[in-house]
Amino acid sequence: MGLEARSDFLVEDLARWGALRGKACFNCGNCSAVCPLSENNPFYPRQIVRYAQIGATKKILGAPAIWLCYHCGECTTFCPRHADPGEVVMSLRRWAIAQYDWTGLGKILYRSPGLSLLFYLAMTFLGSLVFYLFHGPMNMQAVQLHEFLPTHLIDVCGISLGAWVLASLGINLYRMGSFYRSEYGSLPLRLSDLWATFWEEVVLQKRYGKCEDRSKWVMHLAMVNGFLLLFLTTAVAFLLNPQGDPSQTPLFLRLLGTVGGILLIAGALIANWRRLAGREVYNHFTDWIFLELVLLAGLSGLGLELLVALGLPLASYLIYAAHLIVVFLLILTAPYTKFAHALYRFLGVYALRLEKKARASAPAPAS
């Protein structure tokens, strides 16, 4: 199968997604020599950067390789041409997410800081307006969160939002899969390999452990497992306590949720520190927005627990509404942010796992 190439892709198109110095690359291979993740593919990330240079867009959209990078920065540090190959890969991810996205919103959020900020402000106003118009009584004698924002209101908003996000992600994943199938064939479903990929690459963040800077591994380990704990405790609490009264939520679930919140805050604080201290090579504006929303979600959640324990009704109601708005923003933009990155990366690593097993089981060539 021949490559469909666009010679202006890297200079004209991808530069608008962040790859400002990629055209300086002369494909020397230094990036592949220093990449800690290239042990099973001596052409990584050199090959995917080359695809960007020649504009092999269909090849890129179907390639799991763009999702395998953990942007440790080694390739950029040792690039003799200062072409910033790591940022080329990061830009390819942003571009690919927008190509998979059927709504067109991903392109706006990634390419325009002004429009992106306007979108977040508009959605914040919308969430605030819904809570203002439909909130219940504010009991000033005791904190009654489930009366202030009635359970049915949270359920209707949450289920509607969840259905929209899951449908969007499903369509985007189908579009991603169609590109993969056109270049590499079908991707079989093997539950044992799916679980092994989830455990090793999501829960343990095993590939991140290969980066020399261990703070990156700790950062992602804390944030990912914080999210997983919060998702698990929220889902179980909904099943056990459909009325939404926090006082009826089992203590062990509240403790697990608190641990998840602490992990989330710790990971977000490490990420902010790395960026402010200049230890993070890549600082796209969308990364900052996501990080601050994550930090606000964690701090407002733990702050709410403290205010409820202290018996401060008005402050509890205000923080509760703010917390839900931040969570609303995180969920609404999930198909375009680091959540989407994590999902696509999971599938990319899963595809790589199957490829490695297929190569290992293939018969040796005849001598």
Image (cartoon, helix red, strand yellow):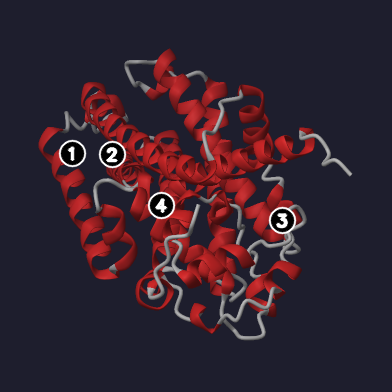
Residue corresponding to mark 3: 41
Q: Earlier in the sequence, mark 2 or mark 4?
A: 2
- Is residue 361 depicted above or below 97 in this figure? above
Label 1 or label 2, whichever comes before in sequence order: 1
Task: Say which amino acid is labelled 1.
Answer: Phe
Q: Is residue 109 above or below residue 326?
A: below
Q: Estimate the x, y position of residue 280 in percent, counting from the top left.
A: 58, 70
Q: CA distance from mark 2 to mark 3?
A: 53 Å
The residue at 55%/52% (across/down) is: 67
Check contact, mark 2 vs mark 3: CB within 8 A. no
The span from disc 1 to disc 4 (Cα, nearest Å) is: 25 Å
Distance from disc 1 to disc 3, alpha carbons, whole Å, reads 52 Å
- Name the element at disc 1: helix
- Residue 317, numbered label: 2
Between the C-alphas of marks 4 and 3, the distance is 27 Å
Q: Nearer the viewer, residue 151 or 251?
A: 151
Q: Work out which residue is located at the far right of the displayed protein and give it.
A: 367
Question: Which comes sooner in the sequence, label 1 or label 4?
Answer: 1
Instruction: Tell me if residue 50 comes above or below residue 222 in the rendering.
Output: below
The residue under label 4 is 337
Label 3 CA crowd tier, 10 Å (few <14, some 14–19, many 20+): few
